Image (cartoon, rainbow, N blue to C red):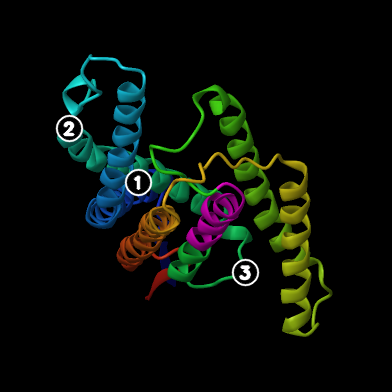
Amino acid sequence: MSLSGNRTAPGYGAILLRGLLAGLIAGLLAGVFAYSFGEPKVDAAIAIEQANADAEVHAAGDAGHSHDDEDALVSRDGQKGGLFLATGLYGVAMGGLLATAYTLLRRRMRIRDNGRAVLGLAGGALLGLVLVPFVKYPPNPPAVGDPSTINQRTISYLSIVVIGLVAVWAAVLASRSVRAGAAEWLRLTAGLGAFLLIVVVGYVLLPTIDEVPGTFPPSLLYSFRVTSLGTQVTLWLVLGLALSALLSRLSAVNVPGKSDSVSV
């Protein structure tokens, strides 16, 4: 007689908890990156904005004081400290979303290894949520931007985020639509073609927004944007690696689809 006991697959709660933990780790490390490389660029941009404001006050003959850090609702030291809170909460949110996506899509993915599946989802999120919007609407320092266009910029940015995610999904569907047994390069070409088609159409349809004044230093603008991108890449890379490692340890205890049998 044979007795078999199936090991239960990890539930959504266990996966979500690890996603939140991985997101917290990723968010804090992204905060360290942003603090080390991004905050000096923000300080420089604020200094330029302050100098321009002082020049306008002087030209107008206003004897009043200029806009100092003490006039702000939150000081720069407070903003720098809040940076870690912001990136930590953002990382936790993204970790929860990645864990949820993994739970919903794992059985449809043609990747046997759980770690590679998580990294694939994290890479797709980085591509759709970050890289596609970055090319169309790269971030600007605090000294750049017209407050009157904030609604238009917000709607346009959210639109390109949706387009980026749709493009990634379309690429996956297009690569799978190629007949079975076809060469791998045909799948890659189909996926890349579908992705580029949707992204290019989105770029053309959405408005171009360029509010950077000609007097703003190009080198500072470039370095700020590269640092902003680096922060996002750090977050998603660490998130994917951390969640992959945590799920691998979880799978070592609960292995889906395997059974222990004892013969009598």
Find the magenta span and give its range: 121-137
Q: Quadrant of residue 63?
A: top left
Residue pictured at 23% horizontal, 54% vertical: 32
Which residue does the numbered mark 2 point to in the structure image? 78
CA distance separating discs 2 and 1: 20 Å
CA distance separating discs 3 and 1: 27 Å
Which residue does the numbered mark 3 point to in the structure image? 110
* Nearer to me, 88 or 241: 88
CA distance separating discs 2 and 3: 46 Å
Horizontal and vertical percent position of residue 121:
52, 59
Describe residue 148's horizontal placement relative to residue 8 as left or right. Answer: right
Pointer 3 or 1: first along the chain: 1
Horizontal and vertical percent position of residue 211:
55, 39
Which residue does the numbered mark 1 point to in the structure image? 91
Query: Amino acid type of disc 2?
Result: Gly
Horizontal and vertical percent position of residue 139:
47, 46
Pointer 2 or 3: first along the chain: 2
